[in-house]
Amino acid sequence: MQTKKLTHTYIKNIDPPDRRIEIYDELIDNLAVRVTPTGYKTFIYRYGAKGKRYTIGKFPNVGLAEARDIAKGLAADIAKGKDPQEEKKTKRKKKDLPTFGELVEEFKKLHLPTLRESTRKEYERIIDNELLPDLKTIPAKEIKKD
């Protein structure tokens, strides 16, 4: 494990290695810059007994100071018992799933015009007053019968 006091200039001038390497920061524990043979440089944070890796971002889009701030925040979250990688995955999954509100709008557009006016008004009343206030932002896949 190579450690060095990382600076912006040092990271910028790292030559592409023969194989992927990680250079750890002396100032912030578990913060490293990963350098690939293609010259791609990424800030990562390692944590946990099994050495889980959280990707902070690509250099220079994410600067060293910002990466250090993010690493400090990750360390605080981990100390509280949170797993930042799992939270990131959960957030990404929820972002991809349609919400109940989105599906309701599609239902209203496609199905309600085919109904009689009185039935359509009753469906709209049920949807708008009883379902949407509680379920609008919840991913549809998470809604169960009970």
Image (spheres, rainbow, N blue to C red):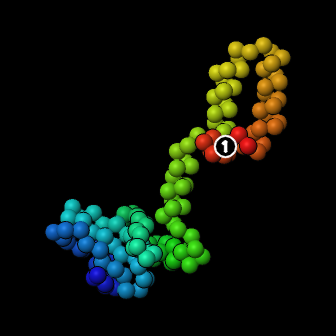
Which residue sits at x=51%, y=77%? 75
Point out the image quarter for the C terminus: top right
Residue 76 x/y as whole percent: 56, 77
Q: Nearer the viewer, residue 52 or 43?
A: 52
Residue 85 drawn above or below residue 33:
above
Horizontal side of 54 relative to 19 (left or right) equals: right
Residue 110 x/y as whole percent: 64, 21
Horizontal side of 68 relative to 6 (left or right) equals: right
Q: Amino acid at mark 1?
A: Ile
Horizontal side of 78 relative to 25 (left or right) equals: right
Which residue sits at x=67%, y=31%? 105
Q: Which residue position is annotated with label 1? A: 143
Q: Residue 31's image quarter?
A: bottom left
Farthest residue to the front: give it. 146
Q: Nearer the viewer, residue 19 or 28?
A: 19
The mark tally for this picture is 1
Residue 52 x/y as whole percent: 41, 70
Which residue sits at x=25%, y=72%? 21
Point out the image quarter for the N terminus: bottom left
* Crowd rating for badge 1 (residues with CA inside 10 Å; few <14, some 14–19, many 20+): few
Q: Residue 26's image quarter?
A: bottom left
Residue 13 drawn above or below residue 29:
above
Give SS at disc 1. Answer: loop
Horizontal side of 19 relative to 133 (left or right) equals: left
Which residue sits at x=63%, y=36%? 102
Instruction: Work out whether residue 63 can be spotted.
Output: no
Q: Residue 91's image quarter?
A: bottom right
Residue 24 x/y as whole percent: 34, 80
Instruction: Work out whether residue 70 can be spotted.
Output: yes
